[in-house]
Image (cartoon, helix red, strand yellow):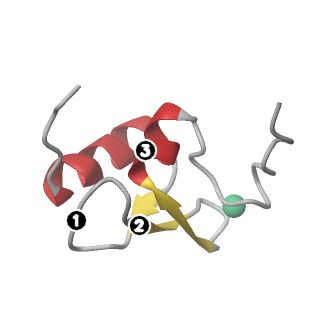
């Protein structure tokens, strides 16, 4: 649970597991919002936790947020 993520590992994860690209170049912690570039060309911000654990790997246009339930 206490896995250490570095910006390099996150970038690798993003490239392997999504069509988005990571634009942020520094990682300060799980609560930080990272800037991604979606395959459609839009930029979007999301924490890595949401990106990874909630499968929110595209911008809000390509993948509209689900109503929470
Ligand atoms: Zn998109």
> Dot 3, how many residues are within 10 Å of its Cα: few (below 14), some (14-19), or many (20+)?
some
- State which image quarter holds ligand 1: bottom right
60 w.r.t. 37: above or below: above
Residue 8 seen in render: yes
Give the labeled residue for mark 1. Answer: 27
Horizontally, residue 24 falls left or right of residue 41, namely left
Q: Which residue is mark 3?
A: 49
CA gap between label 2 and label 3 equals 10 Å
Residue at figure coordinates x 18%, y 46% from the top left: 5
Pick the front one: 47 or 39:
47
Give percent across and percent down for residue 58: 62, 52
Q: Is mark 3 within 8 Å of ligand 1?
A: no
Secondary element under disc 3, as helix, strand or loop, is: helix
Q: State how many labels appear.
A: 3
Front position in the image: 49 or 63:
49
Q: Nearer the viewer, residue 53 or 42?
A: 53
Earlier-in-chain disc, 2 versus 3: 2
Residue at the top extreme, as displayed: 1
For the C terminus, give its image quadrant: top right
Asked if the residue at tag 1 contacts the one at tag 2, i.e. Cβ–Cβ closer than 8 Å, the answer is yes
The residue under the point 45% across, 57% down is 47
The image quadrant of residue 16 is: top left
Q: What residue sits 64% from the left and 73% below the top?
A: 42
The residue at which mark 2 appears reads as 34
Judged left or right of residue 2, residue 65 is right
Residue 7 shown left or right of residue 58 in the figure: left
Q: Is residue 18 something one can see in this rendering?
A: no
Dot 2 lies on which element?
Answer: strand
Q: Could you give the CA–CA distance between mark 2 and mark 1, rounded to whole angstroms? A: 8 Å
């Amino acid at each position: 649970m206490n896995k250490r993520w570095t910006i390099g590992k996150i970038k690798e994860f993003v490239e392997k597991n999504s069509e988005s690209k990571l634009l942020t170049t520094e990682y300060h912690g799980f609560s930080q919002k990272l800037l991604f570039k979606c395959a459609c060309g839009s930029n979007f911000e999301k924490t890595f936790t949401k990106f990874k654990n909630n499968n929110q790997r595209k911008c809000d246009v390509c993948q509209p947020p689900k109503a929470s339930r």
